[in-house]
Amino acid sequence: MKKIYAHRFGPVFTIATIAIIISFITRIALLIASKKGFDFTFLNIVGVFGIGLFYDLAFCTYLLLPFVLHLALTNNSIYKKPYQWVLIGAYLIALYILFFTNLVPKDYNTDLKKAIEYLVLFWFVSYIFLLTQSQSLRYKWRTVVLKCYLFLAIFLLLFNAVSEYFFWEEFATRYNFIAVDYLIYSNEVIGNIQESYPIVWIVIGIAALSIIIFIPAQKYIAASVRSSISIKQKAVVAAVLFLLPLATYLLLNNRLKRFSGNEYANELSGNGLYEFGAAFWNNELDFYKFYQSMPNAEAFAILKNELTVPGAKFISNDTFNIEREIAYAEPEKKMNVVLISVESLSGEFMKAFGSKENITPMLDSLAQHSLFFTNFYASGTRTVRGLEALSLAIPPTPGQSIVKRPKNDSLFSLGSVFKKKGYITQYLYGGYSYFDNMKAFFGGNDYDVIDRSALSDKEITFANIWGVADEDMFNHCLKQLDSNYANGKPFFSHIMTVSNHRPYTYPDGKIDIPPSTQSREGAVKYTDYAIGKFLKDAQSKPWFNNTVFVIVADHCASAAGKTDLPVTGYHIPLLIYSPNNIQPQKVDALMSQIDVAPTILGLLKFNYHSKFFGQDIFNLSREQQRAFISTYQGLGYIKDSNLIIQSPLKQVSQYKPNFATGAAIKMPLDNRLKKQAMAYYQCAFYMLNKGLYKR
């Protein structure tokens, strides 16, 4: 065994051993953290650790590439002609590309780009220096470098383990698209971490543990540097180690882990960093490649049948054209609309849905004076999914949200309908709108974007890394709405809150939960307070009596559960409030976020051309009601108290969900429901990719 670790490629086996042990311990820690939701069966235990080991080994094939490259190329030959000129040329080309071209986008994680630039520059300077030194010094240098590599790798693996634990606490899942976004928007994320956790002590602890592991692990490094190995042997070993990640990339995907009916078991059997890579490369999944489909003509025929409702007339006989003329007998109401999408507002937070904590007193009171929708569901688990559904009224397509994709401008949106009617249309956000690509998306789809940068220093009384306090943004919104009114035009203003987000900080003295607790409950209650204050202040405005206020969550605080798509993880509130125009009513119709836009337009009795997949809920029979929920891979369709889930590898399953607990019983497939679900998602994917959802 000692010979393996003292071999020329011994450091590769050393770091692989350490990585697997750390992954094993991480998996145990996450299992303990999720013990309430995990089904402790023999099959689940074996699957979690057996499949988990397989993915850990797969991740190691990528992790070891820098070590293999270094060990394969660093020998005395690289300091002799002509190799020295080849290497110098390669370094200079790399430095030119990194520093002086746009080949590496400058706006894509600037911190990471700078780190790579200076690392390459450091190696170039080091190489030039070593050209003039003795062979003995080069051996010492290579030993020191490998030891530094080893320590850095141990530190990063431990840091990742701690990060995975915190990520699991927040999302009950391995790394996914959220983690990819966190890498891109490093400023907000690093700030959030600094404000949420004792990061200095965590780093000190990780460094100390890294040293403890490093001391026994590094003793074979010097022996491996001086280890004698022929060029042929080195080439063979390096070739095998280089081929392993290629084989992993070509032959393996992250769907092998889906072996259990318990979602916690499936997630635990993965490897976090492997999952991160999978999410990074698959920001959009090809529906036809990964999901069951049907002939497009059949799918559109089913969809058109579903979209056939009173007052809707298709304008074309084209099979793939779903544009309808929507008409109401009553006259149009040119009322203002203020849509407030609330960060992470689960239905379970409200007393109306059984909460005993009294953290939404204002919303609970407002529900009695509004259209209060009690059977309403979020389309996804992220803010961008909620924004996508609320603005585009389209089912969630697999992969990344449309908000984050390229070429997502000029789409048929709620903003475009209002703009065509002569409205001022706005998206107002308390943070910086470059985050999650909001500025580009809303700016390209008929909204004027107003964010934190529009507020003066005097207007900001409190802020954290995500944005200004909700009160501050609402106060600024009041000024904007006053300005809109002064222009003599009706307005549609979509406001996005930020306070109900970790680190859960907010101004002191506003509610009875001190901000020092940094609790979700406090953040929810503060946002509830801020919305109440905004509505109270709005009552004194001349535009109030002619305004409809729509309050809706962007998604739940958590969508974790034993099943892939637990319905309780998507149940959110929707309130529509206009005391002088809308009679209070509790509405139990089944609907989801894609139905909000057409329902608002229906309340205003607008006549317009529509490409929306969503429907005016008051224009649907109970038999037609349905809802859409999703992860980035799982596509859910709720109808007739059943849940159809479409998954990659062309899997379709049907469940009878318990809408109180989130548990679900697998059922035989109803072919009618299956085809309806497939048609909605397939047609949405088809229209987006063919450019048919442009306005």
Image: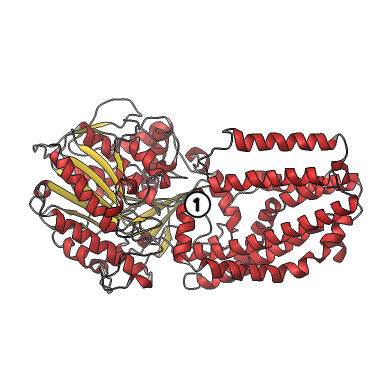
Say left or right for 550 vs 222: left
> Which of the 4 image quarters holds residue 223?
bottom right
Query: Which residue lies under the disc numbered 1?
Result: 186
Q: Position of residue 491 (x, y in %)?
A: 19, 41
Amino acid type, label 1: Ser
Say left or right for 465 vs 316: right
Q: Position of residue 144 (x, y in %)?
A: 78, 58
- Disc 1: CA contacts within 10 A as few (<14), some (14-19) or many (>=20): some
Say left or right for 256 vs 308: right
Does the image show residue 590? no
> Which of the 4 image quarters holds residue 41?
bottom right
Placement of 262 over or under 404, stated as above or below? below
Looking at this view, is 417 or 116 the one in front?
Answer: 116
Q: Position of residue 439 (x, y in %)?
A: 37, 41
For image coordinates 78% across by 64% down, the residue present is 218
Q: How many marks?
A: 1
Q: Position of residue 61 (x, y in %)?
A: 70, 52
Quarter of the image with the C terminus in it: top left
For image coordinates 50% across by 39% down, the residue present is 286
Does the image show residue 349? yes
Quarter of the image with the N terminus in it: bottom right
For image coordinates 16% across by 48% down, the residue present is 548
Looking at this view, is 457 or 53 the one in front?
Answer: 457
Give the color scheme: rainbow, by chain, secondary structure or one colour: secondary structure
